[in-house]
Amino acid sequence: MPDINKLLEQNDAGFKRYTGIQKITFKAMLEAMKQHEAAKTKLGRPSELSLEAQILLALTYWREYRTLYHIGMDFGIHESSASRMVRKVEDILIRSGQFDLPKKLPRGDVDDINWSAVIIDATETPIERPKKTKATTTAVSENNTP
């Protein structure tokens, strides 16, 4: 697992180079996670990773596009746990309203989409089909069919 304290001791440029975000953004994410944890009413099994490590795990996934298996190995957890953790961090940060994470699709309203240009690939591509000739087709006599 990456040493979070060593990472936080780096200067702003080194921290941003590793995580893709500034330290101040990381601290705001951590604060949003702490607020969510404090507001939880349902108790369950505590996570093996600290909140800082959970955020770092999600940042690693978003930044490096590595497989969850490899990220899980680095953090000492199973890939399914890493997947759940990434989704949990995403959901908490989006619900906090402080962060605008990229969404997969617009909400469905046509007015939400900024259409500056629409490009449609409508080029025809010929399909190669075998030529039908008398030599390639086989004639079947009617008296041989059952």
Image (cartoon, grey):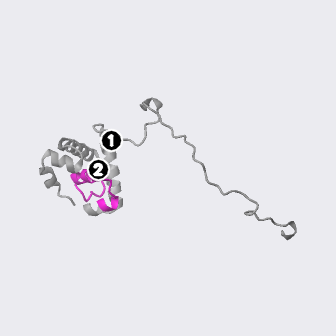
Image point (84%, 67%), residue name:
141
Find residue 22 and report its image quarter: top left
Furthest residue toward top: 111
Work out whether residue 146 can be spotted: no
Image quarter (top left, top right, bottom left or bottom right) of the N terminus:
bottom left
Q: Which residues, given as a range, are shown in magenta?
A: 42-71
Of discs 1 and 2, which sits in the foreground? 2
Q: Tell me whether circle 1 and circle 2 mark residues in contact (CB < 8 Å).
A: no
Q: Residue 26: percent from the left, percent from the top?
A: 21, 45
What element does badge 2 sit on?
A: helix
Does residue 130 lie above or below 14 as drawn?
A: below
Q: How many marks?
A: 2
Amino acid at dot 2: Arg
Q: Residue 4: percent from the left, percent from the top?
A: 17, 54
Answer with left or right where residue 2 lies relative to residue 141: left
Answer with left or right where residue 49 lies relative to residue 108: left
Q: Residue 52: percent from the left, percent from the top?
A: 21, 51
Work out whether residue 52 can be spotted: yes
Residue position for label 2: 63
Instruction: Please rate how many residues cluster around mark 1, counting C-alpha atoms within 10 Å: few if below 14, some from 14 to 19, many from 20.
Output: few
Dot 1 or dot 2: first in sequence order is: 2
Residue position for label 1: 101
Q: Nearer the viewer, residue 52 or 58?
A: 58
Find residue 130 and report its image quarter: bottom right
Reply yes or no: does residue 109 show up in magenta.
Answer: no
Reply yes or no: does residue 50 show up in magenta.
Answer: yes
Instruction: Please rate how many residues cluster around mark 2, counting C-alpha atoms within 10 Å: few if below 14, some from 14 to 19, many from 20.
Output: few
Image point (26%, 47%), residue name:
37
Image point (35%, 54%), residue name:
84
Image quarter (top left, top right, bottom left or bottom right) of the C terminus:
bottom right
